[in-house]
Amino acid sequence: MTIRLLAALLLLPASLLHAQPAQRFAILITELMPDPSPPVGLPAQEYIELKNVSQRPVNLLGWKLSDGASTANINVAFILEPDSQVVICSHSAASMLSAFGSCIGVSNFPSLNNDADVITLYSPEGATIHAVAYSDQWYQNSVKINGGWSLEMIDAANPCTAAANWKASTHPGGGTPGKDNSVKGINADDMPPTVVSTYAPDSLTLLVLFNESLDSLQAAIPAYYALDQGMGHPLYAEPQPPLFRNVLLTWGSQLSTSVSMLTVRNITDCSGNPIGAGNTAKAALAQPASPGDLVINELLFNPPGGGVDYIELYNRSNKAIDLKQLYVANRLSTGKFTNIHQLTSNSNLLFPGDYRVLTEDGQWVQQQYIGAMHEALLQMEALPSLPDDQGHLVLMDAQEVVIDELQYNKSWHFALLGSDEGVALERIDYSQSAQNSQNWMSAASTAGFGTPGYRNSQFRADLQAKGMIRLTPTLFSPDHDGRDDFVSIQYQMAEAGFVANITFFDAAGAPVRHLARNATLGMEGTFRWDGLDNERRRLPPGNYIMYAELFNGQGRTKKFRNTVTLIRHL
């Protein structure tokens, strides 16, 4: 401790050195240097920057930083003034980094993984003040991802948003330790939280996954959650630290293997945005997959240059199946399995009638195939080998029980196709054998040569729910002139008891209007869209895609995708 710092501390009142416990987000992690090599201008040392965004000085004595594997304790009294920063690093790096700003060296400094990690800041009382789950995708720069550049927070008033509020430093030195971030700007969070998915760790509990951090006090109120089929509200709701993106719900009676619907109300994210249309998710106890429950439904094995392969799975059973229990592999001519890859290390349920797309780059798939649904993508570190001419792909469980198997050949593509590059091979009827070459066809050009995450363009069998949806007109002009002012979505069902989700997407694949969420259907009826987005704002002219999903409690489902064109008269 320097004489200057000691003198400053002696002048501080005792009430400041022993102040009230810090509130969540009073101190923020605002800069990280996970990969300092090769250096750009800063020392080749990892560091974490903290910033005081509260209205009062904070003594950092007793505060902790952890990556879950190791924890660093700040063992010196350091007063972090409002709107000021300090760098935390190892003792060996402190002498080098102190030249750039205030710096505290600590023992057991957590190692910052280059690809991804979760770093948590704890107060002396053990409260989670801020946590950052970063990944190398946050750099948003193909050069800087290779090292020497820090990750900087854009807007310290928006600590909840993850990737959208971080990017690589733009400072010529590679970072701004101890100073205002080079990317500093206004980046307000005005997006509501949404429910991403659920899974049941056991028969009494349900873990609900959200897309961003929640207000942990509101998220802990059981009355804000409800499960249908007579389950009602949970007994307990426990937001999960350190990110508070997930909530563990506990009921007093067992959950069902039948598909239920969870509805979440009233909670907000940590920026205060209330949950909106994305407040529901399917839920069920998972069951083991049996042969034929899941099928390999679509395959891209010859992507264009710079692209990636993908494998689409379809759940044709009435079970909710946890993809964590499954693997994809190649099979050699000897019968031996090779290149075995677990689908995911985290529980990920595939519900009846749903699709999941396995790929190494979900962002590329979405950009290449406009209709690709983000929620259907499952990014993997690696896929089995998928040669451009022919290959042997297996979906199996941990006991090597084969769920589905496919020996594909490029000759199965449409014979008059000029090139099969970037063209997916689609299964025509998922109830027929995978190995029947007549059961496969090239994805239609009108569907963009691939339908990852929704019904195949070449699908011919209709063994799902009976019904239809029709859009009229397909060209509309919502200008209130009394002619074609809205699109009518008319439906007819062959049986009762179905529920509908209807969403409109723009040409880039972004959802713009959630028209219906878990709407109970009669035998026939009509919805209509007036060309406005979720905030009741006018949308620009262009093509829009309607995606409708109809399902019932028995797992029967039907999905529709149609295109309409919005025009506006001057």
Image (spheres, rainbow, N blue to C red):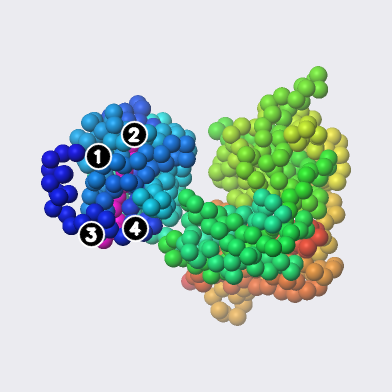
Q: In whole angstroms, how far apart are the C-alphas of marks 3 and 4?
A: 12 Å
Front in this rendered view, residue 276 or 207: 207
Instruction: Please tell me whether mark 4 sits on a helix, a strand or a loop.
Output: loop
Which mark, residue 103?
1
Which of the two discs, 4 and 2, labels the residue nearer the N terminus? Answer: 4
Q: Are marks 4 and 1 in contact (CB under 8 Å)?
A: no
Q: In whole angstroms, how far apart are the C-alphas of marks 2 and 1?
A: 13 Å
Instruction: Please tell me whether mark 3 sits on a helix, a strand or a loop.
Output: helix
Residue matched to label 4: 21
Which of the two discs, 3 and 2, labels the residue nearer the N terminus? Answer: 3
User: How busy is the neighbourhood of tag 1: few (under 14 within 10 Å), some, or many (20 plus)?
Assistant: many
Disc 4 residue type (three-letter): Pro
Residue in view at x 67 percent, y 32 percent: 341
Left or right: 538, with 500 as reference point: left
The image shows residue 14 at horizontal and vertical percentages of 21, 56
Q: In whole angstroms, how far apart are the C-alphas of marks 4 and 2?
A: 24 Å
In magenta stretch: residue 54: yes
Which of the two discs, 3 and 4, labels the residue nearer the N terminus? Answer: 3
User: How busy is the neighbourhood of tag 2: few (under 14 within 10 Å), some, or many (20 plus)?
Assistant: some
Front in this rendered view, residue 410 or 430: 430
Which of the two discs, 3 and 1, labels the residue nearer the N terminus? Answer: 3
Residue matched to label 3: 15
Q: Quadrant of residue 256?
A: bottom right
